Amino acid sequence: MIVLEGTGTTRPCHDTLLRAMFDRHGRMLERYVTKLLDGDHHAAADIVQETAVRAWQHVDGLDVGAPDFRHWLFKVARRLVVDRHRSRQSRPAEVGGEMPERPSRAGDPAERIQVRMAVSDLLAGLSRSHREVITELYLRDSSIADAAHRLGIPPGTVKSRAFYALKTLRTTLAEPGSLCPL
């Protein structure tokens, strides 16, 4: 607790809390979370960081020196790991950073027209909702958050629609006799 000068009141200092938490419990917490995540050090660091954020958010009700503080940290971390696992189980696998290659701006104007026509035909084969997402993400170069805001849907829905739209496009392109030169 920090005594605020001139006021006579005490209030926990956020920075002091986080420093004390990491000094006392950081290494052990990270080892614990890494073990829960089967050795994934990057994910464990994210969970430890989120645990620190939760501690920072609840600074008024925590006492770093109390014996139950460590128990509270480990419980929060374990719940975050469980939440992470559940969220990954409940959604389709994420597309691994693959982005369709964009045609170069240089080159023959006739070739650019042909590519535009082919892309237009491919997009016409998608449902309206999938076409809107692809248009926002790839043709307007919007982020997922921006596309979600413009379309009025949650970011997870944008990701899901993009996943299934790209899957449909790949299937269409892989079909024999596909007229698309891409």
Image (cartoon, rainbow, N blue to C red):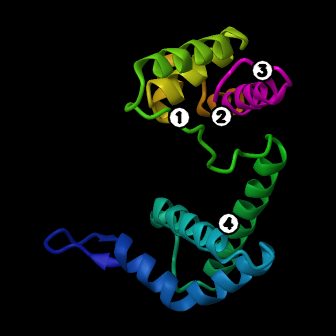
Q: Earlier in the sequence, mark 1 or mark 3?
A: 1
Q: Is residue 149 magenta?
A: no
Amino acid on which disc 3 is placed: Ser
Residue that mark 3 sits on: 178
* Mark pair 4, 2: CA separation: 28 Å
Residue at image location 69% in from the left, 85% down from the top = 31
Please name which of the two marks, 2 or 3, marks the residue nearer to the observer. 3
Q: Which mark is residue 144?
A: 1
Q: CA distance from mark 1 to mark 4?
A: 29 Å
Q: Which residue is mark 2?
A: 159
Residue at image coords 43%, 77%: 17
Q: Name the amino acid type tagged 4.
A: Val
Marks 1 and 4 in Cβ contact (< 8 Å): no
Which residue occupies the foreground of this view, 10 or 151?
Answer: 151
Q: Is residue 159 rendered to the left or right of residue 53? A: right
Q: Residue at x 59, y 22 (%)?
A: 133
Per the rendering, the mark at residue 173 is none
Question: Which residue is disc 4 drawn over?
Answer: 76
Q: Which portion, as a residue range, is magenta?
A: 162-182
Q: Position of residue 81 (x, y in %)?
A: 74, 63
Q: Is residue 152 visible?
A: no
Residue depth check, mark 4 versus mark 2: number of the one nearer the observer: 2
Report the magenta stretch's main SS. helix
Q: Secondary structure at mark 1?
A: helix
Residue 54 in which image quadrant: bottom right
Pointer 3: residues within 10 angstroms few (<14), some, or many (20+)? few
